[in-house]
Amino acid sequence: MPGRAPPRKPIDIAIVKSPFSWLTSLSINCKTAIRLQSAALDHPLPWRQRWGLRIHLILCRWCHRYGRQLGFLRQAAHSHPDQLTQAVPAQLSPEARERLRQKIRAAAQDGNPSP
């Protein structure tokens, strides 16, 4: 037909590169972002991981929020180091112990393995 254009050749996607292909090499998922945020507290990250994490935190509000919470916990732990070493053992009152014993015995008599 005289007015019809010839069919186009399909484009090979492997040949065409996006001008932002370097950016996709920096993209990380949420699981990796969480791991990198924890690792960044212990040691400096390599530049590629650092920039990948920054880009992800700009785009993902949940990971950004997690990073803020992690920073808060770190700051709280560093501001009260004396309280970290003084763990208070959890003890039940004698009345509570007796109530637990009675429930365990009653459950054993009924044939139930747990209360």
Image (cartoon, rainbow, N blue to C red):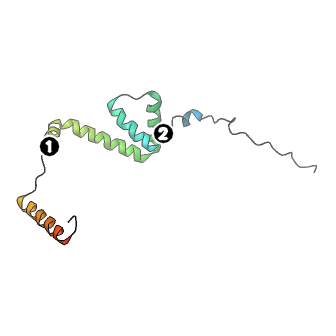
Which residue lies at the image location 36% right of the left edge and 33% below the top edge? 40
Residue to which mark 2 is pinned: 28
Which residue lies at the image location 22% right of the left edge and 68% below the top edge? 112
Q: Position of residue 13 (x, y in %)?
A: 69, 39
Which residue lies at the image location 13% right of the left edge and 40% below the top edge? 86
**Which tag is nearer the camera, tag 2 or tag 1?**
1
- Can the viewer see residue 57 in this picture? no
Badge 2 marks a residue whose secondary structure is loop
* Callout 1 crowding tier (Cα within 10 Å): few <14, some 14–19, many ≥20: few
User: The residue under label 1 is which amino acid type?
Assistant: Ala
Q: Position of residue 3 (x, y in %)?
A: 91, 49
114 versus 52 height, above or below: below
Q: Are marks 2 and 1 in contact (CB under 8 Å)?
A: no
* Residue 82 placement, left or right of 55: left
The image's mark for residue 87 is 1
Q: Where is residue 23 in the image (x, y as percent from the top left)?
A: 55, 35
Q: Closest to the observer: 35 or 69?
A: 35
Q: Position of residue 26 (x, y in %)?
A: 51, 35
Query: Could you give the CA–CA distance between mark 2 and mark 1, rounded to whole angstroms?
Result: 38 Å
